[in-house]
Image: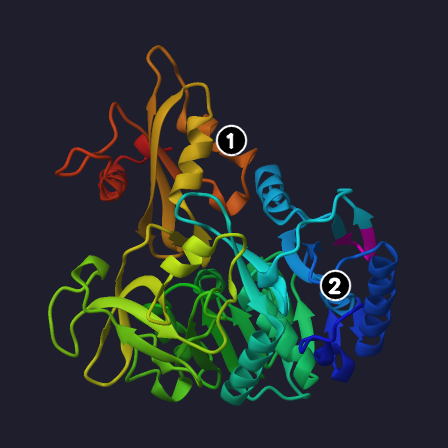
Amino acid sequence: MAKTGALCRILDEAAGTVAEDGGAMHTADALRAAAATLAARLRADGIEPHEPVIVAVANRAADLAAFFAVWQAGGVAVPLHAGAAETTRAAILEQTGARFLVSDATVTRIAEAAPPARPLLDGAALIVFTSGSTGKPKGVVLGHDRFAGKLDALQGLLALTSGDRVVLPLQLIFIFGLWVALLSLKTGARLDLVGKFSPAGLKARLPEATVLATVPSMLRTLFGEGDVPAPRLRAILTGGEGLGTHLAGAIAAQLPDAGVFDLYGLTETGSCDFCLKPADAEAGRGSIGRPTPGVDYLISDDPAAGATGSGPDAPGELLIRTPFGMLGYLDNPDLTQAAFRDGYFRTGDVARRRPDGCVEIVGRIKEIVSRGGNKIAPAEIETVLCAHPAVAQALAAGVPDPRLGEALHAAVVLRAGSTASAEELRAWCAGRIERFKVPDAIHVVAALPTGPTGKAYRPGVRALAEAASSAPTQAR
C-alpha cells in the first residue's frame, strides 16, 4: 500500500511550471499526470513499502515526476546521474539492492529479488550518496518529514513567491539542487532546469531570472567572462564551497540589487545550516554567517577534533544539531553512531566563532576535496589510479585554486620498468570515473611525499603543485 509522505503534498499543491533545456515547458498538471502514471506502473510491478528505487537524473522535468512517482508508490528515491560512471552506478546498485530504475518516463526492472527490509527506511524519502573518506560512497537517508520541515525553514529565510523565476544549473543528484527544485514547486515559482552548465547557456537564462542557485566555481566562471545580464535578479543562492571576498565583491559591483545568500551545510544535516544573509554580507564577509532556523551548533574543545586552544573563540570542529538531519547512513549503524557526538553531527570542518557572532571555517579535519562544490574522496581517485598497470602508488589531495576553490592533484609512482604520462593517466581516470573527479594535474614522481612519521603526506601533494606552477610541464 502506498504511503502519503510529506513531500508528496508538494506536487499535490504545486501551481508553477518547469522549463528545461531546449525550451520545453511543463505545467504542474503535466507533472502530476506523469507522476501518477509512473507510480501506477511501480505498484503494478510489485514495489514493496520503503523499497529503494533508482531515479536516473539529467535535470529534466521528467526527473521531478519520477521522484514524486516513487514517493507516491511508497518507495524511497535514489538519485543517480544518468551519465554516471559504471563504477559509481555499480556501487550504488550493490549498496541499495534496487530492482527498479525510473528513467525517461519509464520503469525498468534491473534485478529480480527484492532488497531486504530495512527499518531505517521507514518514513524515508531519499537516499543521497556522497563521497566517503574511504572512497566508498555513503548512502545518506533523508526522511519525508524532516526534509519537508527544512523546506519550510528555508522558505522563511528566502521567501520565494509565485512570481519568481528560479534558474537552477545544479544537478538534482545533490541535496542543494533537490531542495531548490522542491521549494520552487512548493511556492509556485517557475523553475528553469539547466542540464549542463556553460557560461553562455546560463547567461541566456538570466535576463528574466529573479533567483539563481549555483556554486561559487560557476559564479567565478560566469563573472570572469564579461558582463552578466541579469537586471531582475534579486537573489543568488550559493554554497558547497567558500565564496571568497573577491568573488563577493565582483557580484556586488555588477549586480548590486542581487542579494547573495551564502549557505553552508551538509547532506547529512539536511543542508543550509548556516547562512550569511545579504544584509550581513559586508560585515560578515569571510564567514558562513549564523545558524538558520532550528539549527544549533558547538565548537568542539577536543584537541583531536582540531581544537587549538581554550576560550569561546578558539578553533575546533564544528558540530551541528538539527531537527532536519539524516535518519542515518544506509546499512551502516556504526558509521552513523560515529558521525555524532552527544546528538551533534561532526562536520569535519574546523571553525571558530568570531567576535561579531559569525562563524568562520578555518580548516578541515576530513580529507574530502571540494572541487567546484563537488565532494571527492582522495581514496577513490587513488584506487582508480593504482588500477593502472603502470602505477605502483598514488596519493591525491586538494590544492587551493582561484576558480574551483580546490583543484584535484595526484602524485603517482610508476612500477619499475613501466612508463605512463600524466595525460595517459588522466585519460585512464576519465574512462572510469565522473569527469569532475578526474585529477586536474598528475605529478609523476620517484617517491610519494612523506610526513614526519614517514607515512604518505597529502600536504606534500600541495607542495608538488606549488613547485610545478613554475614548471607546468612537470604536472601535465
Q: Name the residue carrying label 2.
A: 70
Name the residue located 84 percent from the left edge and 61 percent from the top edge. 43
Q: For the residue marked with disc 2, what is the amino acid?
A: Val
Label 1's element? Answer: helix
Given residues 264 and 326, the one toward you in this image is: 326
Q: Residue furthest top?
A: 417
- x then y, percent, for residue 128: 56, 59
Q: Residues within 10 Å of mark 1 (few under 14, many from 20)?
A: few
**Which label belongs to residue 291?**
none
Q: How many marks?
A: 2
| Residue range highlighted in magenta | 102-107
Magenta segment includes 274: no
Residue 395 visible somewhere in the drawing: yes
**Which label belongs to residue 427?**
1
Horizontal arrangement in the rendering, residue 371 relative to residue 175 (left or right): left
Among the 4 quarters of the image, the one containing residue 382: top left
Name the residue located 44 percent from the left edge and 79 percent from the top edge. 260
